Image (cartoon, rainbow, N blue to C red):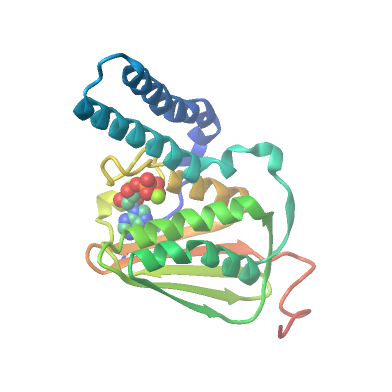
Amino acid sequence: LRKHLIKSKKLEVVEQMGAAISHEIRNPLTAAIGFVQLLQENGVTASKRKEYLSLVKGELESAERVIQDYLTFSKPSLTSVEELNIRRELVHILAIIQPLANRNSVQIKTSFAGIGFINGDRQKLHQCFLNVLKNAIEAMPAGGILEVETLFSASHVTVTIRDNGLGMTKEQLDRLGEPYYTTKEGKGTGLGMMVVYSIVRAMKGTLRVESAPGSGTVFHFIFPSAKSKTLDSFPIE
Ligand code: ADP
Ligand code: MG
């Protein structure tokens, strides 16, 4: 397994990404409008009509993917830091992702020992884990097992997300988090992991990724525990 540490210089571009991302949404919308205009013309044949409609659908899906991977993150006005019960948040996030897991024959296994709190923005934390969980499920096209574990100490909260999917080569691992880097031709934004790294950094956490082609990928998130609620004050739930 190859280990990989978060590199912050990779992330410096992120702050300037907002304008670029809006293009990523505007371009497919503009294209969709163009096809709708063609559809409105007189004498469009049934087969052309079918073709234009499918192009419109493709462009709208493309815009929707960008919004899904990026939207929460791009709303700085919503930022509000609070103490988050990591287990509670994960249970909520897993309920959101469960239908996607079901559709892909992915079984979700959890191991939540104890209770721990971190300081962070709830929406951004959700976006972060949703992006990683979505990738994990997408990496298991023939089904598989998705494991989510938490570990708590007085100083740190660790979240481990493991899949037994396609895995990544060293080259892929090196490029993880690079804006627009995707191996999902026509179906990926390449924005999900960039957003993940940025959120982890904002929450003063670290992310370590281990992966090997054919055997799967493990994401280790480590966040500092929220000060006022440590293990000592909450030995059991
Ligand atoms: P997208 O999912 O739109 O391709 P991301 O930024 O979310 O963009 O992910 C970038 C790339 O990283 C993916 O295209 C994929 O190649 C790789 N990747 C991310 N997570 C995993 C995983 N769990 N297993 C295998 N490859 C992954
Ligand atoms: Mg993704």
Image location (x, y in percent) of residue 174: 33, 49
Residue 192 visible in this rendered orientation of the protein:
yes
* Residue ID at (70%, 44%): 79
Q: Is residue 106 placed above or below 127 in the rendered structure?
A: below
Camera-side residue: 43 or 26? 43
Quarter of the image where the N terminus is located: bottom left
Q: Tell me what residue is drawn at x 32 percent, y 18 percent.
A: 38
Specify whether 22 is left or right of 232: left
Quadrant for residue 223, please give it. Answer: bottom right
Report the residue at 47% width, 66% height from top: 98
Residue 8 seen in the figure: no
* Farthest residue, direction bottom: 236
Residue at the extreme top of the image, as rendered: 42
Of residues 10 and 94, the one nearer the viewer is 94
Q: Position of residue 208 (x, y in %)?
A: 44, 60
Q: Is residue 85 above or below residue 61?
A: below
**Direction from residue 118 to residue 74 in the image, left or right:** left
User: 159 left or right of 32?
Assistant: right
x and y, in percent, of residue 226 in the image: 72, 64
Q: Quadrant of the C terminus?
A: bottom right
Quadrant in which residue 26 is drawn: top left
50 and 92: which is toward the camera:
50
Task: Residue at 60%, 66% (x, y): give it.
Answer: 92
In the image, residue 234 above or below residue 62: below
Percent across and percent down for residue 12 are 51, 36
